[in-house]
Image (cartoon, helix red, strand yellow):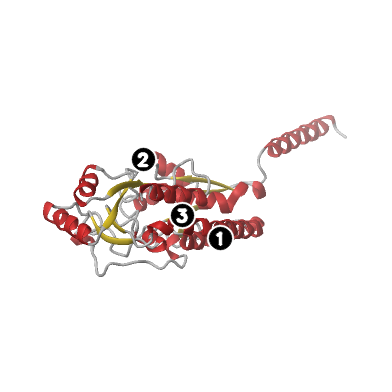
Amino acid sequence: MRPDLRQFLLRLCFAAATVTALLGLARPAAAARVKVVTTIQTLRVLVDEVGGPHVLAVALVGEHVDPHRLDPRPSYAVTLSTADLLIHVGLELEKSWLPPLVAQARNPRIRTGAAGNLDASTAGIAIKTDGPATRASGDIHPLGNPHYWLTPDHALRIAHAIAARLAAIDPAHAADYQRRASDLTARVTARRAAWTEIARPLAGAGVVSYHRSWSYLTEWLGLVEVGAIEPKPGVPPDPRHLAELVRTAKARGARLVLVESYFPRNTAQRIAELGGMRLVVLPSDASATTRSYVELVDQQLGLLAGAR
């Protein structure tokens, strides 16, 4: 063999060995985690429970932040640009801020209609409506009440929808996603009896809400919503509405005023005082440190039980 040809072949082998070594340091494609971006923290919790070690999930809405009115940062578009799956509440909850971010991300995988875009409200959720409503009248729930994720039945429907979508994106781990969703169902089912017992003393109690965040939760627990501080979702109250609300609350024997952790408490506290009720500040979403859906429900029921 000619010396120059031998030298060329040796260099080629060395280069191939180097590339092989470098590729060995990288994560194999089959083992790469699915990048999931959710809007709210509760969806992130469900993704973590269903996806386990196969996913890397992050939520855009932080703690004590109104999900209707998130102030979008440029970094959010960067996060979305590499996502394999975007999961959002839908029903126009994120209408004011999510569509522009998705457009800025320029990621075809997560555009509306793509496999990487999951609207959680399509997971067989029974959506509550308060009759005809439009954004022109100030109502920010024109398609129905989007605060559906807190009840066990809805959370489990969402979890199984997440499992199905992850399986479509990552077929290699499809069986594991389905198994983990079934395991979550078993954990929630095992906890239901305890939740029922905790909520029993609250059954039939009248409550006033600040925003229509609790309609699904109160129905599940047997509480009775007698009115809301906002005359329509997203519309600030006027003195006349508040005076009528206090009269209604007294007449119907309401016991609690429920307010989200991101709303101002002065008005809610005043209504509670005038109506002889107790103010309860509840998180309407999981926190960044919440590790399970069961943990979230335990926290909420603990706060409600402590106020009775």
Q: Which residue is mark 3?
A: 198
On the image, the x and y values in percent for residue 211 come to 28, 54
- Whether 110 is drawn above or below 18: the answer is below
Q: CA distance from mark 2 to mark 3?
A: 40 Å
Q: Earlier in the sequence, mark 2 or mark 3?
A: 2
Q: Which residue is mark 2?
A: 73
Q: Is residue 39 visible?
A: no
Q: Which of the two marks, 2 or 3, is nearer to us in this view? A: 3
Q: CA distance from mark 3 to mark 1?
A: 15 Å
Q: Earlier in the sequence, mark 2 or mark 1?
A: 2
- Give amino acid for label 1: Thr
Q: Which of the two marks, 3 or 1, is nearer to us in this view? A: 3
Q: Is residue 126 visible?
A: yes
Q: Looking at the image, how many numbered discs can be counted on the residues?
A: 3
- Give amino acid for label 3: Ile
Q: Nearer the viewer, residue 93 or 8?
A: 93
Q: Nearer the viewer, residue 154 or 116?
A: 154
- The kind of secondary structure element at disc 3 is helix
* Residues at discs 2 and 1 in contact (Cβ within 8 Å): no
Residue for point 22% across, 58% down:
249
- Whether 125 is drawn above or below 250: the answer is below
Q: Which mark is residue 189?
A: 1
- Give amino acid for label 2: Arg
Q: Nearer the viewer, residue 273 or 287?
A: 273
Q: CA distance from mark 2 to mark 1?
A: 39 Å
Q: Report the quarter where the N terminus lies.
A: top right
